[in-house]
Image (tube, rainbow, N blue to C red):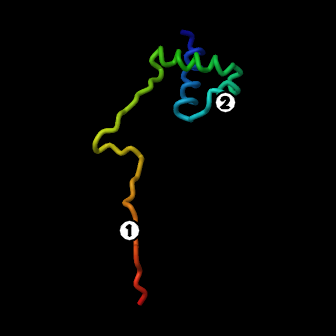
Amino acid sequence: MHPERLELLVQIATWYYEEDLSQEDIAGRVGLSRPMVSRLLQKARDHGLSEIRVLPPQEGRHTGATFLPDPPSFTSFDAP
């Protein structure tokens, strides 16, 4: 693979996976169509430049969600 092509694949994958740019935004930056960006992202995965992993929740691993206890419910209130 040509070094320029490799550099393009890395840049596109970085923008998409690390900087959360849309394929449409990336296409505008590099002057390509959105479908071509999609194909280049696939090529980056095929060449081992990026990977997608799904990590099922495990006990003890922080998932980013915070669960707060239910607030106490007051059914009656005695004023002083």
* Circle 2 or circle 1, nearest the eye: 1
At label 1, which amino acid type do we have?
Pro
Q: Looking at the image, which residue is at 38% across and 61% down?
A: 70
Residue 38 placement (x, y as % from top left): 59, 20
Checking the image for residue 1, the label placed there is: none
Task: Tell me the SS state at disc 2.
Answer: helix
Q: Residue furthest left?
A: 59
At label 2, which amino acid type do we have?
Asp
Q: Looking at the image, which residue is at 39% across and 58% down?
A: 68
Q: Which residue is mark 1?
A: 72
Residue 28 placement (x, y as % from top left): 70, 26
Q: Residues within 10 Å of mark 2 (few under 14, many from 20)?
A: some
**Left/right of residue 65 with respect to residue 59 in the rendered view:** right
Q: Which residue is mark 2?
A: 25
Question: 35 or 74: which is nearer to us?
Answer: 74
Question: 75 or 47: which is nearer to us?
Answer: 75
Q: Tell me where residue 10 sits by quadrant.
A: top right
